[in-house]
Amino acid sequence: MVKMAANEEKQQGHRPGVFKQKNKGHKHGKHRTKGELERENKGRVSVTALTKKQRKEQKKMDRRHKANQLRRNKKDMVLTEKRRLGTRDGPPHLVAVVSLHGGVDAGVVTKLLRQEGTGGVVHQERCVSGVSDSFGLLFPRVKQRFTFLSHSTADIHSLLDVAKIADSLVFVLDCAEGWDNYGDYCLSCLFAQGLPSHALVCQGVADLPVKKRVESKRALSKITEIRFPDARLFPLDSEQEATLLLRHLATQRQRKLGFRSRRSHLLAQHVTFTANGPAEGTGATPAGLGTLCVSGYVRGRPLQVDRLVHISGHGDFQLSQIDAPSDPLPLNLTARTTKSGKAGDVDMQDGGEDEAPVRVLMKANPSRRESLQAEAAVDPMDGEQTWPTETELLEAEEARKNKRVIKVPKGTSDYQASWIVDEEEENGETDEESSEEDDDDDDMLDEAMDEAMDGEGDDVMSQEPGSDCASSEEEEEEELCATERTGADQRYDEHIDESAEEEGLKRYREARANVLFPDEVDTPLDVAARIRFQRYRGLKSFRSSPWDPMENLPLNYSRIFQFKSFDRTRRRILAEAAVEEEGAMVGWYVTLHISDVPFSVMESVQSGKPLMMVSLLPHEQKMCVMHLLVRRHPSNTEPIKSKEELVFHCGFRRFRASPIFSQHTSADKHKMERFLRPDAPTVVSVYAPITFPPAGVLLFKQKNDGIQDLVATGSLLSCDPQRVMLKRIVLSGHPFKINRRSAVVRYMFFNRDDIMWFKPVELRTKWGRRGHIKEALGTHGHMKCVIDQQLRSEDTVLMNLYKRVYPRWTYDPYVPLSLPWFKREVIVDVDDLEME
């Protein structure tokens, strides 16, 4: 019985069948936390199993790690470069001492820096070739080395060259005034070019009474904070203060200049010249050419022997080989302090240049060496030519027999020529001559016509009745004035150039007329307007009307090199230069053998000027159309006319050229400016060697007395030969009879043919009205014009005409010396003293 009861209890359990309902489980996969997922996966990660959110988080972390690595690498690179400067693995710390006041002497600063109390050792006197006040300073205890050179501010070009290559600048100020006018002028040039790391030093504070020292420092700090808001002012009157200055120079943050950090450069410390031997097959020696051996420390980037080098102020040259002489400023010194404890007792244990043999590092490969070719080879027969068919030859022969020969202005199409009446032109020779002249001749013709029209009034006045009496009275008055002149007046007039005064007056009048009546010209009376302005055309809209940039290019465009994409080429070349690790490394002391250098370079070094050399990037020796974005310097107020010769400082280059000015806009056409505007940035276009930006730009104007004034400062914009610059002229007419929708205009043209020629060009007025020419009235230049609104009697009808202009090919790498303008002031002061 008990057994049967147990079986019955077991049979009570239900066993589900095949058709039992199965409910769906709870979908908690999307609601699981990251911790639950990690516990379930137990460290297993499958790429296919990762969700979209997880993949996004992983990419975010990868980007964050990559940014951290780049930031860390860049920081390490900056620290490595900073620590390498002045040490054994890098070039010596190059410091230039510049005096900004005529009453202070930079030599006193260098004398204090070389004293024994500073802890340094003067290892080499006159370590920079051509610079007498230069020396090398070693600090064996901290393993630092410096090269100091004191440069005069009289030669502004040499000062700018030294600032381009110096690691630090030390400005010597006066304790009372800071800097004078010429010092402020030098600072303007240095700031515009790009200022490296610098320090301010003042002298004479120790000579003041104790109570006035704090007040003097406060006044000087107030003066200097305008130019140097964050700079520290160092008084320098003792050896202890000189030690603080040296410590500051060694530890201060280095300012990076883009135009020199991307190119290897070198300051010559030893220069020799060897004249070339007789040329093969001729037996003649090239006049003044030879091999220049320049020794110095490589800076910036590694130096390659196959690249071209540019010597500032002298041109581009090729390298033949690079040698590795012994370092003249080594740090492997054994310091032995005597019992007296003087830090200056140091034994020099280094191998001189005579003991160690010179090792040849590399020689130029003729197959890989870059060429000095600056201009493209011009082939006048290089053009698209096709041989005509027999049918075309027969048609041409028939057309020649039945051809109606007439003289038309240059640029006239066949359709326009068919409507011109065949009449005898009195100025037929003028048509042929104008068809052969180029853009420069046409511009000269414009200037000549303007001068002739300006001088008509004077000629008429001189031919009026009674002019003889008036001239005789003026002569008598001039004689009386001449007899009454004193000796002081005569001495004052000795320094005045009458021709320069007349030229300056003429330029001022032209600039003032251009401001009052922009681009307005007078229609000549003796030449037909359709002949005089045959190179100009009208545009319905200056912004949207098309202008083909490849149309009617001048012959000089066949001499230049062009890029398909200048920006792409620039990025590629700069990226390749940033990763180059071949050639003479930074910090090596090398000797460069430069081929075919004129002896004038050696004469410049012997005269006391420093020699700077820079390695050019690919294509930087080739000529092209360079565009510079500049702004007028406030210190210069004289009008600067377009196509006037100026002196350029562009990066490491220095040259003379005649540029043209244009507006800085984002359009595809740019209006030419006749004068350099003082109130807006201006684009300066010039034929010059290619330079990859960034690079600072300075413009100087050479005067007749040898003084070069700073005109404008800016930066390098681009290299684009297809930039369209249009010169605008405005012809003006005056309303004679005014109706509701039309008006009769006169004084714009003076014959009927000119009116019909310019009939398609749109008209505008100074009050904003627009219209067009409807018909000519009579034969004396009166025309009926249709206007969109009724004209006012005081309004003026204008017609805009345009033509494309190009700069002049006047590139000259030779720049004359600049006479300091403070010398001229000294001469005037002496005369004033004599007069008194």
Image (cartoon, grey):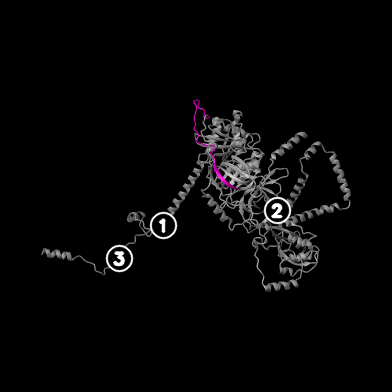
Q: Which residue is mark 2?
A: 674
Dot 1 falls on a residue whose secondary structure is: helix
Q: Write down the quadrant of residue 723 in the picture.
A: bottom right
Q: Amino acid at mark 3?
A: Asn
Q: Earlier in the sequence, mark 2 or mark 1?
A: 1
Between 695 and 606, which is closer to the camera in this rendering?
606
Q: What x and y, as percent, mark residue 557? A: 66, 57
Q: Amino acid at mark 2?
A: Arg
Which label belongs to residue 55? 1
Between 113 and 447, which is closer to the camera in this rendering?
113
Observer-side mark, 3 or 2, equals 2
Q: Amino acid at mark 1?
A: Arg
Which label belongs to residue 271? none
Residue 376 can be seen, yes or no: yes
Work out which quarter of the rendered image holds the N terminus and state it: bottom left
Q: Which residue is mark 3?
A: 23
Q: Which residues are magenta?
A: 318-344
Q: CA distance from mark 1 to mark 3?
A: 33 Å
Callout 2: few (<14), some (14-19), or many (20+) C-alpha neighbours within 10 Å?
Answer: many
Q: Write down the quadrant of residue 216 in the picture.
A: top right
Q: Write down the quadrant of residue 533 in the picture.
A: bottom right
> In the drawing, does residue 514 fall left or right of residue 276?
right
| In magenta segment, residue 327 | yes
Dot 2 falls on a residue whose secondary structure is: loop
Please identify the dominant SS of the magenta region.
Answer: loop
Residue 291 drawn above or below residue 686? above
| In magenta segment, residue 753 | no
In percent of the image, x 57 and y 55: which residue is there? 567
